């Protein structure tokens, strides 16, 4: 699973965890196991304000664009985060934070 972050100035918090093809966002589980390889799940088909675009499965890996909230004057790794590839299940450490 690859998370592609879209930084946004917000005061709310984000917590993520992964279990297989399930991404839990702030306590709500989103199961993407039905997305076949080469397919795209449109963002408007996902009832989640944290999803920042279409979810795709490319070469077997889910690619999920997600909003990354930050406060004023974020660190460089938060303002300009690299995509994050998650290979194991559990809590996801966000840029600028520990899991």
Image (cartoon, rainbow, N blue to C red):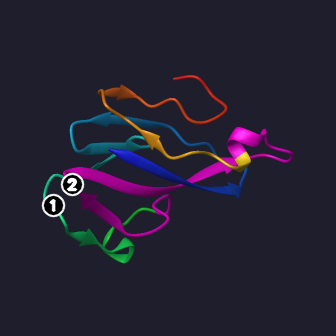
Residue 60, magenta (yes or no) = yes
Q: Specify the quadrant of the image occupied by residue 91.
A: top left
Residue 26 visible somewhere in the drawing: no
Q: Nearer the viewer, mark 2 or mark 1?
A: 2
Q: Which mark is residue 2?
A: none
Disc 1, SS:
loop
Give the residue at mark 1: 37
Residue 72 visible somewhere in the drawing: yes
Disc 2, SS:
loop
Choose between 91 and 3: the one closer to the eye.
3
Q: Which mark is residue 59?
A: 2
First in residue order: circle 2 vs circle 1: 1
Q: Specify the quadrant of the image occupied by residue 88.
A: top left
Answer whether labels 2 and 1 touch (C-beta < 8 Å): yes
Place of residue 32 in the rendered image (x, y in percent of width and height, measured from the top left): 22, 54
Reply above or below: 80 against 90: below
> Which residues fall within the magenta stretch?
49-78
Look at 61% across and 42% down and name the residue there: 13
């Amino acid at each position: 699973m690859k998370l592609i972050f879209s930084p946004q100035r917000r005061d709310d918090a984000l917590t993520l965890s992964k279990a297989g093809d399930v991404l839990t966002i702030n306590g709500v589980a989103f199961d993407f196991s039905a997305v076949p390889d080469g397919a795209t799940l449109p963002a408007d088909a996902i009832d989640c304000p944290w999803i920042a675009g279409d979810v795709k499965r490319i070469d077997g890996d889910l690619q999920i664009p997600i909003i990354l909230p930050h406060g004023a004057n974020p660190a460089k790794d938060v303002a300009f985060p690299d995509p994050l590839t998650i290979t194991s299940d559990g809590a996801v450490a966000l840029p600028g934070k520990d899991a």
